[in-house]
Amino acid sequence: MVWDGLPLWFELKIISKVNRLNITPHQVAWHMAYYARGGLSFFLAKAPSSRGIVLFSGSKGPELITKPVSEVQGSWFEGPAPLFEALRPEIEEHFRRALRPAPRG
């Protein structure tokens, strides 16, 4: 997704009946490499039995592959509108930090 010219990635997932996300090691590696290079990515998950959605930073991949969703820090939202309202400041701050000029030596 590109939001106001800023790129970010969402990996869309369904929370299983055993409170897990089906994430592969390859997906975790991609998110970690993208994050390490200043990128912004997320795992966006929904439980089939709920209207709510949960957002995890892409950097949470190693935890999400080994732990139940309820044991990993994420942000729960009642739908897309509150999600994007809360996400906008985080996106702006991330890219403000990532795009600031390098210090002069």
Image (tube, grey):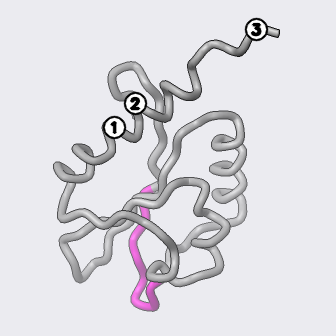
Question: Which amino acid lies under the numbered mark 1 shown in the image of this protein?
Answer: Pro
Comparing labels 3 and 2, the label whose residue is closer to the camera: 3
| Prevailing SS of the magenta stretch | loop
Comparing labels 3 and 1, the label whose residue is closer to the camera: 3
Neighbour class for label 2 at 10 Å: few (<14), some, many (≥20)? some
SS for tag 2?
A: helix
Of pointers 3 and 1, the one earlier in the residue sequence: 1
Q: Nearer the viewer, residue 97 or 12?
A: 97
Q: Are marks 2 and 1 in contact (CB under 8 Å)?
A: yes
* Drawn side of residue 66 relative to residue 80, left or right: right
Please tell me whether residue 101 is drawn above or below residue 10 in the rendered image: above
Q: Are marks 3 and 2 in contact (CB under 8 Å)?
A: no
SS for tag 1?
A: helix
Disc 3 target residue: 104
**Which residue does the image show at 66% across and 59% down from the upper left?**
28
**Which residue does the image show at 46% across and 91% down from the upper left?**
18
> Residue 35 bears which disc, if any?
none
Magenta residue span: 12-19
Question: Which amino acid lies under the numbered mark 2 shown in the image of this protein?
Answer: Glu
